[in-house]
Amino acid sequence: MAKRTSPAKSPPKPAASAPAPDAERTLHLSLLRSMLLQRRFEERVAEAYAIGRIGGFCHLYIGQEAVSTGTLSHLRPDDYMITTYRDHGQALARGLTPRSVMAELFGRVDGCAGGKGGSMHMFDKATGFLGGHGIVGGHLPIATGVGFAIKYRGGDQVICCFFGEAAVNNGAFHESLNMAALWKLPVIFIIENNRYGMGTSVERASAINDIYQRAGSYDMHRGVVDGQDVLAVRAAIDEAVTRARTDQSPTLLEMRTYRFMGHSMSDAVSGTYRSKAELDEYLKRDPIALLRAHMEERDTLTEPVMQALDTEIKAIVQDAWDFAEASPEPPLEALMEHVYVDTTSDTISAAGGWS
Amino acid sequence: MAIITYRDALNQALREEMQRDARVFLMGEEVGVYQGAYKVSKGLLQEFGEMRVVDTPITELGFAGVGVGAAMVGLRPIIEFMTWNFALLALDQVVNAAAKMLYMSGGQFNIPMVFRGPNGAALQLGAQHSQAWESWLAHIPGLKVVAPGTPYDAKGLLKAAIRDDNPVCVLEGEMLYNNKGEVPDGEYIVPLGVADLKRKGEHATIVTWGKQVLVAMAAADQLAKDGITIDVVDLRSIRPLDERAIIDSVKKTNRCIVLEEGWYFAGVGAQITDLVQRECFDDLDSPVLRVTQADAPMPYAKGLEKAAKADLPKTIAAVRRALYLD
């Protein structure tokens, strides 16, 4: 586990070769679908929260969908991902069913964590979704440990770790980057720089504003990406994934994005720490609108196709809502279940989790 | 039956479990090249290599979390804290991640890992290096907590902890590493959650664990000279707690003294006192008494440190008081 000594690279460039037209259209449509699903889903989440179907803390992802879709569309099924409490969109982008995510938000037994996690703690072992985590920065060491396990087993998987830009001021960030670089672990650290840690702007929280440069302290590959451009996100992730799979080296990518909603459901969209004018500027760079415009320019998307897609997705989200509403609340016996498991390494197959 | 040190007993447990299961690895500060700050991991780097005996930077929060992540995807980490005092920097991973992952994920991700290292005071190490953390750790649902007092229990409990599919905190003792005791030659396990009646008596029960077991045994020896015989209930595990062993002993002796290394306020002894007053109310001939560290940070000066510790004279005094002898 020698420390790498080669100099860190400059920000990644877009992928050189363009896909064939048909393949391109299929890809772009799938990206559009993924982002639109997150958008329509979360619009209904806001509605459900307003009428009390969803409780607690609830953080919407609207505006940042290019980051989740661009990243997760590039992963293999056996790769891993881990994220923050702003996790609904990423859960959908990773392939959790809208039903299981909505049922979790409603606190029902058919939720992806059986109703015990809630908005901030989505989990799904089947898709390598290692959770939404509620303590800022707390999941970065965990991601590093998953990278360690991949290397330990000699695999070529990667783990993508999403976090907000505010986490870079937390010790867990630095400890994790240091270990990942020191031990050459296949971890892709993704800063979703939406400009605000709750209500504190990056300029008021970080001594440097180009925060991807912090990876320079650890001689780690790094880059800054237009996080509203799903194709740019994919290109950057492509390079980082290749590096992780072939060289087992970590990468830090700063995705510059913006949340169109407040920090959580109790936070106004604008007016206190950010202005309406600023919000309006960023709304012009809606990731879904940007991809749509790009496709229309290339004649790969028409209005009827877009409308049909939207109608289909709205129906999927309505189905998720209906499913969640029909799903029972966890029985009271569930209260004391899953505090401990009563197994040991002798009772669980030695192959458990050892792929 | 061989006579070996507590340190070597732990070393045997680590070696045997790493030989048995390729998913088990040891990670922490100075565990490899240095052979362990207290030489518990002596020889393991040479036998298992640097992927399985991993020296870390001084980054407790970081490597504790590395353990959690590795455990989530199927490995079985042993995370060594040079002392539990340093684990405070890692508590977010111990409490918010390791202990809760199974529950938050609705049963999908159990965390089969061990956090271990010396706990409590040694000699004149001052306030920041002389703290016993069991009440903090045992407070957390999802964690198991054990504190072996003898080489036999150290080996057996550590092996059980490594095989357990939950996060287990193993609290060792800096002052115990050199102590010798009998350890069987063959394989054995000390199950978690099972206390051991280290001494049988009639007049009072001392409930204790970890290094205070030695104090309790010394107290029992001394009191025996006056014809007072003591049940010494060594909990070995704080959580899960062997309530039956405590209740059975107190129902027999009708007097209970809880001897612990840590502070008085909200200590483990408070939990045990609660149990005893509920389950043995009609059996008690005197109030449950507690012997703990003085309710102050640990001082450096020798005389003050001695005054602060839950030691032999204080334990004997408590037993005599419970028997209304003084």
Image (spheres, coloured by chain):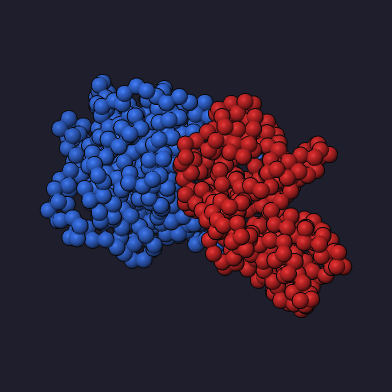
| Looking at the image, residue B48 lies above or below residue A267 | above
Question: What residue is rendered at 29% in x and 45% in y?
Answer: A165
Foreground pick, B157 / A13: B157
Tell which chain the image draws in blue: A
| Looking at the image, residue B223 lies above or below residue A144 | below
Image coordinates for residue B307, horizontal then vertical, percent:
62, 63
Q: Quadrant of the N terminus of chain B?
A: top right
Residue B258: tell me if it is visible: no
Colour of the chain lettered B: red
Q: In the visual, does B153 lie left or right of B136?
A: right
Question: What residue is rendered at 40% in x and 27% in y?
Answer: A249
Identity of the residue furthest to the left in this view: A277
In which quadrant of the rendered view does residue A324 lie?
bottom left
Image coordinates for residue A250, horizontal then vertical, percent:
38, 31
Image coordinates for residue A188, horizontal then vertical, percent:
37, 34
Foreground pick, A182 / A154: A182
In which quadrant of the rendered view does residue A322 lie?
bottom left
Question: What residue is rendered at 51% in x and 43% in y?
Answer: B64
| Looking at the image, residue B40 lies above or below residue B193 | above
Residue A138: tell me if it is visible: yes
In which quadrant of the rendered view does residue B293 lie?
bottom right
Question: What residue is rendered at 80% in x and 56% in y?
Answer: B198
Image coordinates for residue B111, horizontal then vertical, percent:
56, 45
